[in-house]
Image (cartoon, rainbow, N blue to C red):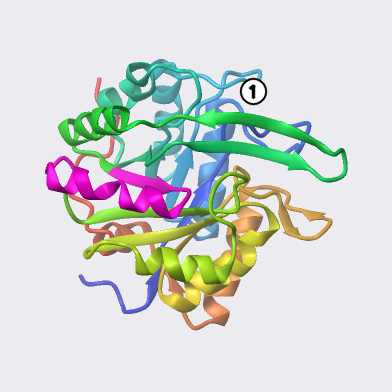
Protein backbone atom coordinates (compact mmCIF):
# COMPACT_ATOMS: atom_id res chain seq x y z
CA UNK A 1 0.00 0.00 0.00
CA UNK A 2 1.38 3.41 -0.99
CA UNK A 3 1.85 5.74 2.01
CA UNK A 4 -0.42 8.80 2.13
CA UNK A 5 1.21 11.91 0.66
CA UNK A 6 3.36 14.28 2.69
CA UNK A 7 4.54 11.79 5.29
CA UNK A 8 7.75 12.68 7.11
CA UNK A 9 10.29 10.07 8.20
CA UNK A 10 11.61 10.82 11.69
CA UNK A 11 14.99 9.41 12.74
CA UNK A 12 16.35 9.39 16.27
CA UNK A 13 20.08 9.25 17.11
CA UNK A 14 20.01 7.56 20.48
CA UNK A 15 23.46 7.95 22.00
CA UNK A 16 26.35 9.06 19.74
CA UNK A 17 30.01 8.39 20.46
CA UNK A 18 31.06 11.52 22.39
CA UNK A 19 28.08 12.27 24.61
CA UNK A 20 28.29 11.19 28.25
CA UNK A 21 26.05 10.99 31.29
CA UNK A 22 28.06 13.80 32.83
CA UNK A 23 26.50 15.98 30.13
CA UNK A 24 23.05 14.34 30.10
CA UNK A 25 21.99 11.62 32.50
CA UNK A 26 19.58 10.10 29.93
CA UNK A 27 22.35 8.90 27.57
CA UNK A 28 21.94 5.11 27.15
CA UNK A 29 25.07 2.94 27.38
CA UNK A 30 24.19 -0.76 27.65
CA UNK A 31 22.40 -2.82 24.97
CA UNK A 32 19.31 -3.06 27.18
CA UNK A 33 19.29 0.70 27.77
CA UNK A 34 19.71 1.35 24.04
CA UNK A 35 16.93 -1.12 23.28
CA UNK A 36 14.62 0.64 25.72
CA UNK A 37 15.45 4.08 24.28
CA UNK A 38 14.80 2.71 20.77
CA UNK A 39 11.39 1.44 21.89
CA UNK A 40 10.45 4.73 23.51
CA UNK A 41 11.63 6.69 20.44
CA UNK A 42 9.64 4.40 18.13
CA UNK A 43 6.54 4.70 20.31
CA UNK A 44 6.90 8.49 20.11
CA UNK A 45 7.02 8.43 16.30
CA UNK A 46 10.56 7.61 15.14
CA UNK A 47 10.75 5.24 12.17
CA UNK A 48 14.57 4.97 12.24
CA UNK A 49 17.04 4.73 15.10
CA UNK A 50 20.70 5.61 14.54
CA UNK A 51 22.99 3.76 16.94
CA UNK A 52 26.60 3.85 18.16
CA UNK A 53 27.70 0.99 20.40
CA UNK A 54 29.01 1.55 23.91
CA UNK A 55 30.67 -0.56 26.54
CA UNK A 56 28.72 -0.73 29.78
CA UNK A 57 30.90 2.07 31.20
CA UNK A 58 29.92 4.34 28.31
CA UNK A 59 33.15 4.17 26.31
CA UNK A 60 32.76 3.58 22.55
CA UNK A 61 33.18 0.07 21.15
CA UNK A 62 33.22 -1.49 17.68
CA UNK A 63 32.72 -5.04 18.96
CA UNK A 64 30.38 -6.93 16.58
CA UNK A 65 29.20 -8.93 19.61
CA UNK A 66 28.04 -5.71 21.31
CA UNK A 67 26.31 -4.52 18.15
CA UNK A 68 24.63 -7.93 17.93
CA UNK A 69 23.31 -7.60 21.49
CA UNK A 70 22.03 -4.12 20.67
CA UNK A 71 20.36 -5.40 17.50
CA UNK A 72 18.66 -8.16 19.46
CA UNK A 73 17.50 -5.80 22.23
CA UNK A 74 16.06 -3.32 19.72
CA UNK A 75 14.37 -6.04 17.67
CA UNK A 76 12.86 -7.63 20.78
CA UNK A 77 10.99 -4.37 21.39
CA UNK A 78 10.31 -2.80 17.98
CA UNK A 79 10.36 -3.21 14.21
CA UNK A 80 11.98 0.21 13.83
CA UNK A 81 14.55 0.64 11.02
CA UNK A 82 18.04 0.12 12.47
CA UNK A 83 20.86 2.36 11.25
CA UNK A 84 24.31 1.52 12.67
CA UNK A 85 27.20 3.98 12.71
CA UNK A 86 30.56 3.45 10.99
CA UNK A 87 32.10 6.82 11.85
CA UNK A 88 35.07 7.27 14.16
CA UNK A 89 38.52 8.81 14.50
CA UNK A 90 41.64 6.64 14.62
CA UNK A 91 39.86 3.29 14.23
CA UNK A 92 40.76 1.17 11.14
CA UNK A 93 38.07 1.02 8.46
CA UNK A 94 37.83 -2.77 8.61
CA UNK A 95 37.05 -2.65 12.32
CA UNK A 96 34.36 -0.02 11.75
CA UNK A 97 32.46 -2.06 9.17
CA UNK A 98 32.66 -5.62 10.53
CA UNK A 99 29.32 -5.31 12.35
CA UNK A 100 27.65 -4.11 9.14
CA UNK A 101 28.86 -7.11 7.14
CA UNK A 102 27.90 -9.51 9.93
CA UNK A 103 24.52 -8.14 11.05
CA UNK A 104 23.24 -6.53 7.84
CA UNK A 105 21.10 -3.73 9.31
CA UNK A 106 18.79 -2.01 6.87
CA UNK A 107 20.90 1.15 6.91
CA UNK A 108 24.41 2.23 7.92
CA UNK A 109 25.91 5.69 8.25
CA UNK A 110 28.68 6.63 5.82
CA UNK A 111 30.71 9.82 6.34
CA UNK A 112 31.30 11.45 2.96
CA UNK A 113 34.41 13.56 3.47
CA UNK A 114 37.22 14.78 5.69
CA UNK A 115 37.03 17.90 7.83
CA UNK A 116 38.14 19.68 10.97
CA UNK A 117 35.71 18.55 13.66
CA UNK A 118 35.67 20.66 16.80
CA UNK A 119 33.56 21.79 19.72
CA UNK A 120 34.39 25.22 21.14
CA UNK A 121 33.18 26.56 24.47
CA UNK A 122 32.64 30.31 24.43
CA UNK A 123 32.18 30.24 28.20
CA UNK A 124 35.49 28.44 28.84
CA UNK A 125 37.29 30.05 25.87
CA UNK A 126 38.70 26.70 24.80
CA UNK A 127 38.22 23.85 22.37
CA UNK A 128 36.52 20.91 24.08
CA UNK A 129 37.17 18.68 21.05
CA UNK A 130 39.62 19.43 18.26
CA UNK A 131 40.53 16.76 15.72
CA UNK A 132 40.64 15.98 12.02
CA UNK A 133 37.82 13.71 10.89
CA UNK A 134 39.56 11.83 8.09
CA UNK A 135 37.40 10.11 5.47
CA UNK A 136 39.46 9.74 2.26
CA UNK A 137 37.93 8.36 -0.91
CA UNK A 138 39.56 4.96 -0.57
CA UNK A 139 37.87 4.52 2.83
CA UNK A 140 34.51 5.75 1.52
CA UNK A 141 34.72 3.32 -1.40
CA UNK A 142 35.70 0.49 0.96
CA UNK A 143 32.65 1.12 3.12
CA UNK A 144 30.37 1.38 0.10
CA UNK A 145 31.58 -1.92 -1.31
CA UNK A 146 31.06 -3.63 2.05
CA UNK A 147 27.54 -2.15 2.40
CA UNK A 148 26.66 -3.13 -1.17
CA UNK A 149 27.82 -6.70 -0.54
CA UNK A 150 25.67 -6.87 2.61
CA UNK A 151 22.60 -5.31 0.99
CA UNK A 152 22.72 -2.35 3.39
CA UNK A 153 21.58 1.15 2.39
CA UNK A 154 24.38 3.73 2.87
CA UNK A 155 23.09 6.79 4.72
CA UNK A 156 25.53 9.44 3.49
CA UNK A 157 26.35 11.98 6.18
CA UNK A 158 27.43 15.25 4.58
CA UNK A 159 28.86 17.91 6.87
CA UNK A 160 29.57 20.41 4.08
CA UNK A 161 28.78 21.12 0.43
CA UNK A 162 31.90 19.38 -0.83
CA UNK A 163 30.77 16.16 0.80
CA UNK A 164 27.73 16.13 -1.48
CA UNK A 165 30.04 16.70 -4.44
CA UNK A 166 32.10 13.70 -3.35
CA UNK A 167 29.29 11.46 -4.57
CA UNK A 168 30.01 12.27 -8.24
CA UNK A 169 32.98 9.93 -8.84
CA UNK A 170 31.34 7.21 -6.75
CA UNK A 171 28.19 7.40 -8.87
CA UNK A 172 30.37 7.29 -12.00
CA UNK A 173 32.15 4.19 -10.64
CA UNK A 174 28.72 2.62 -9.97
CA UNK A 175 29.66 1.81 -6.36
CA UNK A 176 26.95 4.28 -5.34
CA UNK A 177 23.52 3.44 -6.74
CA UNK A 178 20.17 5.22 -6.51
CA UNK A 179 18.09 5.83 -4.55
CA UNK A 180 20.58 7.97 -2.67
CA UNK A 181 20.14 8.49 1.07
CA UNK A 182 21.53 11.79 2.35
CA UNK A 183 21.83 13.22 5.85
CA UNK A 184 22.66 16.92 5.79
CA UNK A 185 24.58 17.48 9.03
CA UNK A 186 24.64 21.17 9.93
CA UNK A 187 26.19 23.19 12.74
CA UNK A 188 29.37 21.22 13.47
CA UNK A 189 32.35 23.56 13.90
CA UNK A 190 34.46 22.84 10.82
CA UNK A 191 31.42 22.07 8.66
CA UNK A 192 28.57 24.04 7.11
CA UNK A 193 26.74 26.46 9.45
CA UNK A 194 23.30 25.46 10.69
CA UNK A 195 21.21 28.07 8.88
CA UNK A 196 18.11 27.79 6.75
CA UNK A 197 19.88 29.54 3.86
CA UNK A 198 22.59 26.88 3.89
CA UNK A 199 20.01 24.07 4.12
CA UNK A 200 18.33 25.32 0.94
CA UNK A 201 21.75 25.33 -0.78
CA UNK A 202 22.50 21.79 0.38
CA UNK A 203 19.17 20.44 -0.83
CA UNK A 204 19.58 22.18 -4.19
CA UNK A 205 22.97 20.45 -4.57
CA UNK A 206 21.64 16.88 -4.26
CA UNK A 207 21.62 14.51 -7.26
CA UNK A 208 18.36 13.30 -8.73
CA UNK A 209 16.59 10.41 -6.96
CA UNK A 210 17.77 11.48 -3.51
CA UNK A 211 16.03 11.13 -0.16
CA UNK A 212 17.27 13.55 2.49
CA UNK A 213 16.99 14.46 6.13
CA UNK A 214 18.47 17.32 8.12
CA UNK A 215 20.61 16.78 11.23
CA UNK A 216 20.96 19.98 13.21
CA UNK A 217 23.51 20.13 16.01
CA UNK A 218 22.57 21.82 19.29
CA UNK A 219 19.61 24.13 19.71
CA UNK A 220 19.88 25.23 16.06
CA UNK A 221 18.31 21.84 15.42
CA UNK A 222 14.76 23.06 15.91
CA UNK A 223 14.72 25.81 13.30
CA UNK A 224 16.36 23.40 10.84
CA UNK A 225 13.73 20.75 11.66
CA UNK A 226 10.99 23.31 10.98
CA UNK A 227 12.65 24.37 7.70
CA UNK A 228 13.12 20.78 6.52
CA UNK A 229 9.48 19.99 7.32
CA UNK A 230 8.34 23.01 5.30
CA UNK A 231 10.62 21.95 2.41
CA UNK A 232 9.23 18.41 2.30
CA UNK A 233 12.32 16.73 3.77
CA UNK A 234 12.83 14.25 6.57
CA UNK A 235 14.29 14.99 10.01
CA UNK A 236 16.55 13.59 12.70
CA UNK A 237 16.58 14.40 16.40
CA UNK A 238 18.05 12.61 19.41
CA UNK A 239 20.53 12.93 22.25
CA UNK A 240 23.54 12.42 19.97
CA UNK A 241 22.80 15.78 18.35
CA UNK A 242 21.07 17.92 20.94
CA UNK A 243 20.01 17.57 24.59
CA UNK A 244 17.57 20.47 24.78
CA UNK A 245 13.90 21.04 24.01
CA UNK A 246 14.56 24.76 24.39
CA UNK A 247 17.18 26.98 25.98
CA UNK A 248 17.79 25.72 29.53
CA UNK A 249 15.30 22.84 29.32
CA UNK A 250 16.99 19.47 28.90
CA UNK A 251 15.01 16.55 27.51
CA UNK A 252 14.28 13.63 29.80
CA UNK A 253 15.24 11.21 27.03
CA UNK A 254 15.16 10.62 23.28
CA UNK A 255 11.39 10.14 23.23
CA UNK A 256 10.76 13.68 24.43
CA UNK A 257 12.82 15.06 21.54
CA UNK A 258 10.90 12.87 19.07
CA UNK A 259 7.60 14.02 20.57
CA UNK A 260 8.52 17.67 19.95
CA UNK A 261 9.54 16.87 16.35
CA UNK A 262 6.22 15.08 15.80
CA UNK A 263 4.29 18.08 17.16
CA UNK A 264 6.18 20.41 14.82
CA UNK A 265 5.45 18.13 11.87
CA UNK A 266 1.73 18.02 12.62
CA UNK A 267 1.59 21.76 13.24
CA UNK A 268 2.98 22.19 9.72
CA UNK A 269 0.45 19.81 8.21
CA UNK A 270 2.63 16.72 7.88
CA UNK A 271 1.91 13.32 9.38
CA UNK A 272 4.62 11.00 10.65
CA UNK A 273 5.48 7.85 8.70
CA UNK A 274 5.26 4.49 10.39
CA UNK A 275 8.17 2.08 10.04
CA UNK A 276 6.40 0.25 7.18
CA UNK A 277 5.59 3.55 5.44
CA UNK A 278 9.18 4.76 5.89
CA UNK A 279 10.51 1.61 4.24
CA UNK A 280 8.28 2.27 1.24
CA UNK A 281 9.01 6.01 1.08
CA UNK A 282 12.77 5.41 1.23
CA UNK A 283 12.56 2.48 -1.20
CA UNK A 284 14.30 0.11 1.17
CA UNK A 285 14.46 -3.44 -0.18
CA UNK A 286 12.45 -6.06 1.65
CA UNK A 287 14.83 -8.25 3.62
CA UNK A 288 14.96 -10.29 6.80
CA UNK A 289 15.09 -7.97 9.79
CA UNK A 290 16.26 -10.49 12.36
CA UNK A 291 19.84 -11.17 13.37
CA UNK A 292 21.32 -14.17 11.60
CA UNK A 293 23.03 -16.86 13.67
Residue 18 rendering spot, x and y as whole percentages: 63, 31
Give the position of the C terminus as an image quadrant: top left
- Residue depicted at x 54% and y 51%: 41
Give the quadrant of the N terminus: bottom left
Q: Is residue 113 left or right of residue 143?
A: right
User: In this rendering, would 166 be left or right of 169?
Assistant: right
Q: Looking at the picture, how far across and down is residue 14, in whole percent?
A: 56, 42
Residue at x-position 38% and y-position 42%: 82
Q: Quadrant of residue 189?
A: top right
Is residue 203 or residue 277 the one in the foreground?
203
- Tell me where the magenta segment starts and ends, as one range: 154-176
Indicate whether 127 appears above or below 165: above
Given residues 232 and 117, the one toward you in this image is 117
Position of 198 relative to 243 (above/below)? below
The answer to whether any part of residue 54 appears in the image is yes
- How dense is the environment of label 1, judged by Cα within 10 Å: few (below 14), some, or many (20 and up)? some
Q: In the depicted view, which residue is nearer to us: 1 or 141? A: 141
Q: What residue is shown with label 1?
A: 58
Q: Is mark 1 on a helix, strand or loop?
A: loop
Q: Is residue 242 above or below residue 16?
A: below
User: Is residue 80 in sight in this rendering?
Assistant: no
Total number of numbered discs in the rendering? 1
Which of the 4 quarters of the picture holds residue 291?
top left
Residue at 13% x, 47% y is 172
Q: Is residue 170 magenta?
A: yes
Residue at 16% over, 31% down = 149
Amino acid sequence: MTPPPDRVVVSCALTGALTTRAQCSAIPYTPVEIGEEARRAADAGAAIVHIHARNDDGTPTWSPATFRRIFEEVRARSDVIINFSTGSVGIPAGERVAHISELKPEMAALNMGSMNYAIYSTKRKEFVHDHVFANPFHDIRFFLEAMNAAGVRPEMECFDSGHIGNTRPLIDLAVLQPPYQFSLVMGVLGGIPGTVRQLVHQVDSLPNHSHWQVIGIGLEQWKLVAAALAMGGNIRVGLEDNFYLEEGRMASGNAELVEKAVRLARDLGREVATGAEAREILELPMQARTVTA
